[in-house]
């Protein structure tokens, strides 16, 4: 299958008070229909800027270079006027904070119906029927009654479902979800992730899941891209990333992620994350990397490029150490 979303050498720079601040420094990736691509990284890694650039929703203070191909058409090369009809119908987004994304003064049904009417020439009652249908699809019980509720009458988990309903009402080819479950408790988190993967299958959408939490992606993602300092430092299948990580940062992230097998083994990553205002030369991870000393000078001066691992189809890593050998076992 062709990718639904392809980023090619995406670069995002913000205008800061003391000069340009790079947030995304050359990201290329593909998201396929019916699959979940997780973009994982700490705050400041550039994952949210990548997401917002993909849907063309960055503020005017940002410059976006490179291509954002949606079913082959470059969104970044279009004037805003041409992007508007694509937003919602071809590509849609859900956020962490449903309360901020929903209008408190309009019923849930009206908001979902209005999103539908943006792309379909139908009357209010037809749009409300569609709202009832998608509310049911996202697991809201008694949708015929709930469609008349206001956002504050929904629980946090239900609001998240309502926002998802609004995002999928026009059956977009691509859904971007930025930390969609971070504000929810663990049980509800699992339910919302299951809902998103179910919708990905049923609608054949490409789901791009943005998260800081590797624990969230193990059972959810098909492909994973790990970002650090505005770049992808490792990408591959879930097995590649979890069973044979090839970047010291990925391995450190895995060790900092709670899981059932080793709940007591959490190890925080020392040092501060790289960011646009603090982007080390060479490998951006070198000030925090346990292997940099062994490699030496090269890590501090030469930026490693993202290379496919020998003998794999699509497991890529950007590291001078693992370009030569495997990471040692514990
Ligand atoms: Fe560590 Fe060097 Fe690899 Fe960067 S390139 S992750 S500093 S070993
Ligand atoms: Mg973010």
Image (tube, rainbow, N blue to C red):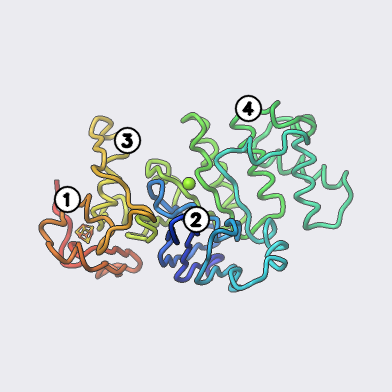
Image point 77% across, 34% down: which residue?
Answer: 105
Label 4: state its secondary structure.
loop
Q: Quadrant of ligand 1?
A: bottom left
Dot 1 or dot 4: first in sequence order is: 4
Q: How many marks?
A: 4
Which quadrant holds residue 128? top right
Q: Is residue 91 visible?
A: yes
Q: Position of residue 141 (x, y in %)?
A: 69, 30
Q: Is mark 1 within 8 Å of ligand 1?
A: yes
Q: Earlier in the sequence, mark 2 or mark 1?
A: 2
Query: Looking at the image, which residue is at 25% across and 57% down?
Result: 247
Q: Give the residue at mark 1.
A: 290
Crowd class of label 1 (few under 14; some 14 to 19; many from 20; radius 10 Å): few
Pointer 4 residue? 155
- In the displayed structure, 247 sits above or below 151; it is below
Q: Residue 197: give its label.
A: none
Residue 204 is at least partly visible in this image: no
Per the image, the residue denoted by label 3 is 258
Mark 2 or 4 closer to N-term? 2
User: In the image, what residue occupies the spot 78% across and 58% down?
Assistant: 119
Q: Are marks 1 and 4 in contact (CB under 8 Å)?
A: no
Name the N-terminal-most of marks 3 and 1. Answer: 3
Alpha carbon separation for disc pair 3 and 1: 21 Å
Give x and y (percent) for residue 3.
52, 68
Q: Nearer the viewer, residue 313 or 30?
A: 30
């Amino acid at each position: 299958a062709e990718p639904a979303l392809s980023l090619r050498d995406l670069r995002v720079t913000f205008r800061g008070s003391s000069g340009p601040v790079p947030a995304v420094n050359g990201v290329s990736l593909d998201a396929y229909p019916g699959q979940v691509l997780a973009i994982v990284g700490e705050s400041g890694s550039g994952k949210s800027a990548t997401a917002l650039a993909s849907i063309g929703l960055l503020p005017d203070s940002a410059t976006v270079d490179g291509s954002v191909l949606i079913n082959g058409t470059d969104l970044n090369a279009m004037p805003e006027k041409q992007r508007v009809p694509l937003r919602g119908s071809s590509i849609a987004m859900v956020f962490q904070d449903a309360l901020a994304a929903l209008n408190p003064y309009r019923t849930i049904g009206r908001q979902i119906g209005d999103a539908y009417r943006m792309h379909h020439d139908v009357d209010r009652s037809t749009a409300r029927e569609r709202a009832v249908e998608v509310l049911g699809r996202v697991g809201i019980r008694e949708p015929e009654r709930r469609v008349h509720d206001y956002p504050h009458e929904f629980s946090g988990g239900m609001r998240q479902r309502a926002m998802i309903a609004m995002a999928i009402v026009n059956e977009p080819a691509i859904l971007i979800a930025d930390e969609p479950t971070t504000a929810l408790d663990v049980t509800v988190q699992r339910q919302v992730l299951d809902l998103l993967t179910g919708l990905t299958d049923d609608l054949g959408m490409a789901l791009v899941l943005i998260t800081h939490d590797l624990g969230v992606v193990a059972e959810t993602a098909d492909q994973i891209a790990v970002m650090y300092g505005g770049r992808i430092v490792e990408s591959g299948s879930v097995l590649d990333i979890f069973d044979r990580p090839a970047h010291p940062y990925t391995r450190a992230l895995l060790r900092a992620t709670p899981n059932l097998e080793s709940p007591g083994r959490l190890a925080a990553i020392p040092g501060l994350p790289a960011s646009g205002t603090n982007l080390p030369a060479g490998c951006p991870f070198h000030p925090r990397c346990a292997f940099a000393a062994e490699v030496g000078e090269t890590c501090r001066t030469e930026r490693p490029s993202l290379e496919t691992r020998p003998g794999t189809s699509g497991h890529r890593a950007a590291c001078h150490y693992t370009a030569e050998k495997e990471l040692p076992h514990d």
